[in-house]
Amino acid sequence: MKNNKLVASLGLLDAREIADFRLYLQSPLFNARPSLMRLLDVLVSEFMEGEGAADQLEIYRRSFPDKAFKEASLKSSMSALLRLLRDFLAFDHLRRDPVAQNHAFLTQLNQKGETKYFPAYHKAALRELDQAQLIAADHFEAQRHLAEEKY
């Protein structure tokens, strides 16, 4: 199990990120399978805090105590949790990066055909970009992305 993609990916997270991922999983907007939280808790306790000696049967028994072991079910649940982790990491990046947020917001406005307020939003995004503490290359890259949305 230690060589599993999900376990390896979870191992990259610090305690704050694990806690934030748990919060993410609690939201029905992001996660329709609350049982995946138990799986996360078992994997974290076993592989991040413990010795990592549990096998698939033990992981399944602790994660889904009221169900008979099915390897396919465990693999499916682990794949779903890995997809949610991927989505969480993208979400977490976006919420911590106002420049990326503005770009995503302007992209969505463009895709939805909004033209009335777009110029004001675009101008505000450029102002925020100018105030951001970016090195020159990042600044110009972000500026290029915002300019692409304008046209």
Image (cartoon, helix red, strand yellow):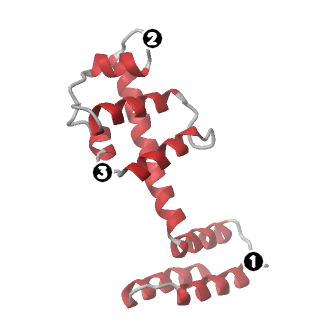
Q: CA distance from mark 2 to mark 3?
A: 30 Å
Q: Residue at x 33, y 18 (%)?
A: 71
In the rendered image, residue 90, in percent from the top left (x then y), is placed at 46, 57
The amino acid beneath tag 3 is Leu
Could you tell me if residue 151 is visible in this image?
no
Residue 28, quarter of the rendered image = top right
Q: Which mark lies nearer to you, 3 or 1?
A: 3
Q: CA distance from mark 3 to mark 1?
A: 42 Å
Residue name at image x 36 percent, y 19 percent: 60
Of marks 1 and 2, the one in the foreground: 2
Position of residue 17 in the picture relative to residue 108 (left or right):
left
For the N terminus, the image quarter is top left
Image position of 127 with respect to 22: above or below: below
For label 1, the crowd category at 10 Å Cα-Cα, with few meaning under 14, some 14 to 19 and many 20 or more, is few
The vertical placement of 9 against 133, above or below, is: above
Q: Given contact means CB atoms under 8 Å apart, are the residues at marks 2 and 3 in contact?
A: no
